[in-house]
């Protein structure tokens, strides 16, 4: 009830992902991140965040750079920020970066309060009585594309997250079976995982949290997951799963959260299941079909301010698959006459670029 957004949600992220390189003994870029005063002060490159900036400033600019970019933070080889962690940091900064804000004082619909409701009732509070994995094994299996971290300081429980679909190899899952007792959270979001691979996933018997969203599974082998007696949260958003394939999972004793948005499972089926299985929360996603949301402007990634030779125009937006329209004559872009941005557009002279999402 007395949870503070910074202390209990933001600070643990910074301690796990940032302060290893930005502390009193090691201050890269003259930046400290271990105290409130240091966070507000910033470093050699300036303030960490700026709510007047479209992208909220330096911290988020660096976090969203490609992993291979030397300025990307955290650097390649270090545990990366997860999507959930970025949501917390972004919304905390956007709401004013209040170090004293209590979760209970936020509006019920506030993103941070919604995230907190899940965060404070999840697997971090469990007691784990199994032995920790060997340190040498952790070092061997930890890579920039398969990041293994303790669930909390001193805990033997491990969180595993995969990054970059092009780098994914199912053999890595087989390697992780060497620590199958310790892995309690497994994130395979957007990896090219197939139905037959669930036979491997089902061997991680202590899994509490499993993210299979936007993988290539169809649901044909979904029933294999009943072999996971501790499973609490399962994400199947954006997969080919259908209602009949889900029914075997609904009787799992500890399952309490099921993410089903962007699937073929319909509202009527979910409503029926929710009335029968009251211990499970079914997340269908946001249904604001009639709400028009204003998007932030696109970002210009080109570092060149003066064109001396042909260069590809680099525009991006943090909302996936959004359409970007642009002009090169200084006029305001519109959805009727302005061209849609494609990454093969080349600039061969100095022009004034304007873009809208």
Image (spheres, rainbow, N blue to C red):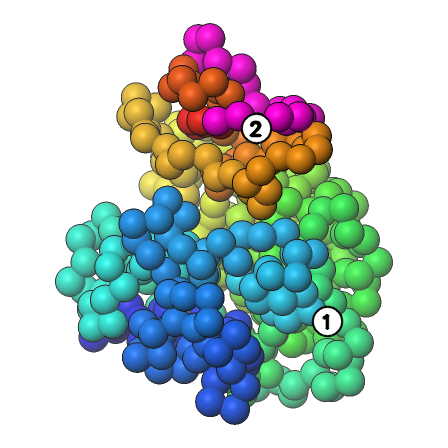
Secondary structure of the residue carrying tag 2 is loop
Q: Which residues are magenta?
A: 335-352
Q: Residues within 10 Å of mark 1 (few under 14, many from 20)?
A: some
Gap in angstroms between the C-alphas marked 2 and 1 = 45 Å
**Where does label 1 land, which residue?**
142
Above/below status of 269 relative to 259: above
In the rendered image, residue 27, in percent from the top left (x then y), is placed at 51, 82
Residue 109 spot, x, y in % from top left: 23, 48
Disc sitting over residue 251 in the figure: none
Residue 350 numbered tag:
2
Q: On the picture, is 337 further left or further right than 130?
A: left
Residue positioned 30% across, 21% down in the render: 290
Asked whether residue 123 is in view, the answer is yes
Identity of the residue furthest to the bottom in this view: 25
Question: In the figure, is residue 16 to the left or right of 52?
Answer: right
Residue found at the very far right of the displayed protein? 171
Indicate the quadrant where residue 1 lies. bottom left
Asked if 335 appears above or below 165 in the picture, the reply is above
Instruction: Please give the name of the residue rendered at 76% of the width and 46% of the height, measured from the top-left corner.
Output: 166
Q: Write the residue at 44% across / 59% down.
A: 58
| Lower sequence index among marks 2 and 1 | 1
């Amino acid at each position: 009830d007395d949870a503070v957004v910074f202390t209990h949600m933001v600070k643990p992220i910074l301690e796990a992902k940032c302060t290893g390189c930005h502390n009193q003994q090691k201050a890269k870029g003259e930046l400290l991140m271990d105290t409130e005063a240091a966070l507000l002060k910033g470093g050699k490159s300036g303030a960490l965040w700026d709510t007047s900036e479209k992208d909220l400033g330096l911290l988020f600019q660096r976090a969203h750079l490609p992993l291979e970019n030397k300025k990307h933070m955290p650097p390649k080889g270090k545990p990366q920020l997860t999507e959930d962690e970025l949501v917390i940091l972004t919304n905390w900064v956007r709401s004013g970066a209040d170090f004293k804000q209590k979760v209970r004082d936020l509006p019920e619909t506030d993103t941070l309060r919604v995230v907190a409701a899940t965060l404070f009732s999840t697997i971090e509070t469990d007691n784990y009585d199994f032995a920790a994995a060997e340190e040498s094994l952790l070092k061997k299996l930890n890579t920039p594309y398969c990041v293994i971290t303790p669930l909390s300081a001193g805990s033997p429980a491990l969180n595993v997250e995969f990054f970059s679909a092009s780098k994914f190899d199912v053999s890595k899952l087989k390697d992780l079976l060497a620590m199958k007792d310790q892995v309690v959270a497994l994130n395979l979001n957007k990896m090219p995982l197939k139905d037959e691979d669930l036979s491997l996933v089902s061997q991680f018997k202590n899994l509490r949290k499993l993210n299979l969203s936007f993988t290539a599974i169809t649901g044909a082998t979904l029933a294999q997951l009943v072999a996971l007696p501790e499973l609490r949260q399962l994400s199947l958003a954006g997969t080919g799963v259908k209602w009949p394939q889900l029914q075997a999972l609904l009787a799992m004793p500890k399952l309490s959260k099921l993410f089903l948005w962007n699937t073929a499972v319909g509202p009527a089926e979910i409503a029926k299941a929710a009335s029968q299985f009251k211990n499970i929360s079914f997340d269908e996603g946001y249904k604001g079909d009639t709400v028009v949301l204003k998007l932030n402007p696109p970002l210009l990634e080109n570092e060149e301010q003066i064109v001396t030779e042909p260069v590809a125009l680099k525009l991006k937006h943090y909302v996936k698959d959004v359409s970007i329209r642009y002009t090169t004559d200084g006029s305001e872009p519109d959805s009727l006459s302005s061209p849609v941005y494609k990454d093969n557009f080349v600039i061969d002279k100095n022009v004034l670029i304007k873009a809208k999402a």
